[in-house]
Image (tube, coloured by chain):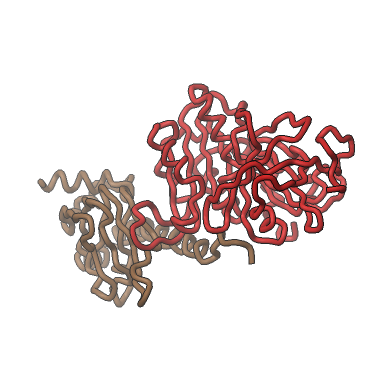
């Protein structure tokens, strides 16, 4: 994949919709194209969160495993969405497994590279925060609703 | 069955007609669909309406019709066995008698949605009152733009009318997206809240009509998501649930602000409901 194509994929991804092209060039320097076959893991719980993924195609299952219960999927991530917010906050460690539920094509962004660039260029950092914080809020809200177990039979 | 009239022609609106169960189908572990022969005088129903089903000695509960309003044959009610009455209803066998009043209440604005995209959002058992609307949308499919069903439920085992949804999806009549709150094992579909499905469908928000039914918390956030997407308040319709007893707007048990849910609802547009949904005491 050419550098130009990679940059275009980044700028066309829904997560980076409307991003200034100059930021696209900065982010592209941390990016590479990746592919996961169904069943492969993008990350495992407890590992360093040194990547994040812009999903271009396919479905990723976010899972937590519990003894005797196996892997429990608590969310799926689809085309146009991202996998990974743990890279934003110390100790930069994955808190779940992310498994390709089918063939997944994605752009992997090197987290340390992105953090370093955001540290040097606070405009880029702010732009990234404006995009990642809504994902965090949305996931927190979704978790709240799932915890309420709205569809359970009335007690 | 002395407390029931011999037919629906009875003039006392509180007197149930005697209807006979003619079929029973298990949908999930605790949800059953009852098929009831229409009593004398039955004139049909509109999608979204409900009946009061009565069992002597146990009580009476409001249950929405879940079958095709245009189809001849039995009236279908989908019941979750959770309380004394609903559990007894779910356990009825063919031949058993059940008291039936109604149909009551307002209907989904299916005919009014002609020419528009239609977004149907269901949560859990809320799919049952929406199914009659889906039958009508499919029956006159050419009259509508894009039609999408977004359905969220607890787990893959709790998906209602699963075979039917799979068949409809294969026939490409509707865009159908299903998500569950949690999954294990071989579930290959989506996991997450139902509102996350909205960005995945193509529709023209400003002119779309949205039909929403599920737990009230789910409906509040579904309405927010639809508004954020650009659907105007009067075009979002929710099916409200309150403690309905008389079903004819007399007893006041289901009062919701200035309305009685049994008579003025259960289907109401969001512009009418918005302020009241934010009053916790209601």
| Residue farthest along the right direction in this orientation | B12
Q: Position of residue B208 (x, y in %)?
A: 53, 33
Is the C terminus of chain A in the top left, top right, bottom left or bottom right quadrant?
bottom right
- Image position of A128 (left or right of A39): right
Visible residue check, residue B238: no
Vertical side of B271 occupied by A70: above or below: below
- Image position of B214 (left or right of B204): right
| Residue farthest along the front direction in this orientation | B95
Visible residue check, residue B250: yes
Q: Position of residue B164 (x, y in %)?
A: 47, 40
Q: Residue at x 30, y 52 (%)?
A: A59
Residue A86 occupies quadrant? bottom left
Query: How many numbered discs sit on the rendered protein?
Result: 0
- Image position of A9 (left or right of B86): left
Q: Residue at x 48, y 44 (%)?
A: B150
Vertical side of B224 occupied by B142: above or below: above
Q: Nearer the viewer, residue A153 or B112?
A: A153
The color chain B is rendered in: red
Q: In the picture, which chain is brown? A: A
- Image position of B237 (left or right of B150): right
Residue B130 occupies quadrant? top right
Q: Nearer the viewer, residue B200 or B42?
A: B42
Q: Position of residue B206 (x, y in %)?
A: 52, 33
Q: Nearer the viewer, residue A84 or B135?
A: B135
Q: Position of residue B154 (x, y in %)?
A: 49, 58
Q: Nearer the viewer, residue B65 or A93?
A: B65
């Amino acid at each position: 994949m050419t550098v130009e194509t990679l940059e275009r994929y980044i700028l066309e991804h829904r997560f980076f919709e409307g991003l200034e092209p100059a930021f696209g060039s900065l982010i592209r320097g941390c990016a590479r194209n990746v592919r996961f076959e169904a069943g492969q893991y993008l990350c495992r719980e407890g590992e360093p969160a040194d990547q994040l993924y812009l999903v271009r195609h396919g479905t990723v299952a976010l899972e937590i495993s519990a003894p005797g219960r196996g892997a429990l999927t608590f969310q799926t991530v689809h085309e146009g969405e991202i996998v990974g917010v743990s890279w934003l906050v110390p100790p930069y460690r994955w808190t779940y497994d992310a498994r390709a539920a089918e063939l997944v094509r994605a752009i992997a962004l090197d987290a340390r590279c992105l953090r370093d660039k955001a540290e040097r260029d606070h405009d880029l950092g702010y732009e990234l925060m404006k995009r990642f914080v809504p994902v965090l809020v949305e996931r927190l809200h979704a978790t709240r609703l799932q915890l309420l177990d709205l569809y359970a039979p009335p007690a | 069955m002395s407390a029931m009239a011999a037919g629906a022609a009875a003039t006392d609106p509180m007197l149930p007609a005697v209807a006979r169960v003619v079929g029973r189908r298990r949908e999930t572990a605790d949800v059953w669909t009852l098929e009831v022969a229409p009593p004398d005088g039955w004139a049909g129903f509109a999608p979204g309406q409900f009946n009061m089903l009565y069992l002597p000695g146990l009580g009476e509960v409001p249950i929405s019709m879940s079958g095709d309003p245009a189809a001849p044959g039995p009236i279908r009610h989908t019941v979750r066995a959770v309380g004394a009455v609903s559990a007894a209803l779910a356990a009825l066998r063919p031949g058993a008698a059940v008291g039936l009043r109604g149909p009551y209440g307002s209907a989904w604005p299916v005919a009014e949605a002609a020419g528009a995209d239609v977004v149907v959002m269901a949560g859990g058992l809320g799919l049952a009152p929406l199914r009659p609307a889906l039958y009508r949308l499919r029956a006159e499919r050419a009259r509508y733009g894009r039609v999408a069903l977004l359905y969220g439920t607890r787990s893959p085992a709790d998906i209602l009318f699963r075979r039917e949804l799979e068949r409809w999806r294969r026939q490409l009549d509707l865009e159908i997206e299903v998500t569950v709150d949690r999954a294990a094992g071989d579930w290959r579909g989506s996991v997450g809240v139902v509102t996350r499905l909205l960005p995945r469908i193509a529709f023209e928000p400003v002119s779309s009509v949205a039909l929403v039914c599920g737990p009230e918390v789910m409906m509040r956030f579904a309405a927010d998501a639809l508004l954020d997407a650009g659907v105007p308040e009067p075009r979002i319709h929710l099916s409200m649930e309150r403690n309905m007893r008389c079903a004819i707007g007399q007893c006041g048990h289901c009062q919701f602000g200035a309305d009685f849910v049994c008579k003025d609802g259960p289907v109401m547009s969001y512009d009418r409901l918005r302020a009241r949904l934010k009053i916790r005491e209601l």
